[in-house]
Image (cartoon, rainbow, N blue to C red):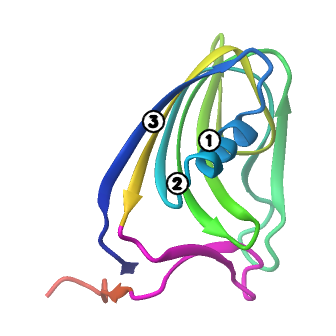
Amino acid sequence: MQYAQGRIGRVFAARLEDGEPVYDAIQELAGREDVACALVLLLGGARSATVVTGPRNVTGPIEPRLQSFDDAREMIAVGTLYPSDNGPALHLHAGFGRDDVALIGCPRYALNTYLVAELVVIEIEGLDAARRLDPESGLKLLRFASAQSVDLGPCG
């Protein structure tokens, strides 16, 4: 495990409107307010999304398994926001429900608000962190410029 210490900065609360793209709204707020690192909390309604629900295979190249919906569902989500080469990069995981059907995963594509969603962005100050491309996995992973390392081997 690698880790770094930061501290809580500003806290933003926002309301997303019907049809508003969630990722765009969060990243726009972060850019406008110059928020580099943050914890993101979101709840409300989701009109539609395409959700990564895991890899197709547990070995080999990572190929995402995708599931889409366009039927308005309840939503609760948590994520992090860190700088990347393309500006603020949001990594969000969410649970979506309708009737007795639940879907949990990473809504990477076309996540749009249904009626209203409430957003809280908690800024993290004092971190030198960013999402950088990991050549081995092909994913943009969180990296710390000056991280502490801990060996999480067996107890004893």
**Image point 13% across, 88% down: which residue?**
156
Relative to 90, residue 111 above or below: above
The residue indicated by pointer 3 is 12
User: How far apart are labels 2 and 3 at the CA level?
Assistant: 10 Å
**Image point 34% across, 52% down: which residue?**
9
Report the span colored magenta: 126-146
User: How far apart are labels 1 and 3 at the CA level?
Assistant: 9 Å
Question: Are the residues at dot 2 and dot 1 in contact (C-beta closer than 8 Å)?
Answer: yes
The circle on residue 35 is 2
**Which badge, 1 or 3, is on the more N-terminal residue?**
3
In the image shown, does 31 or 129 lie closer to the viewer?
31
Mark 1 element type: helix
Mark 2 element type: loop
| Badge 1: residue crowd in 10 Å (few <14, some 14–19, many ≥20) | some
**Which badge, 2 or 3, is on the more N-terminal residue?**
3
Question: Are the residues at dot 1 and dot 3 in contact (C-beta closer than 8 Å)?
Answer: yes
- Counting from the top left corner in percent of width and height, residue 5 is at 29, 71
Pick out the residue farthest to the left. 156
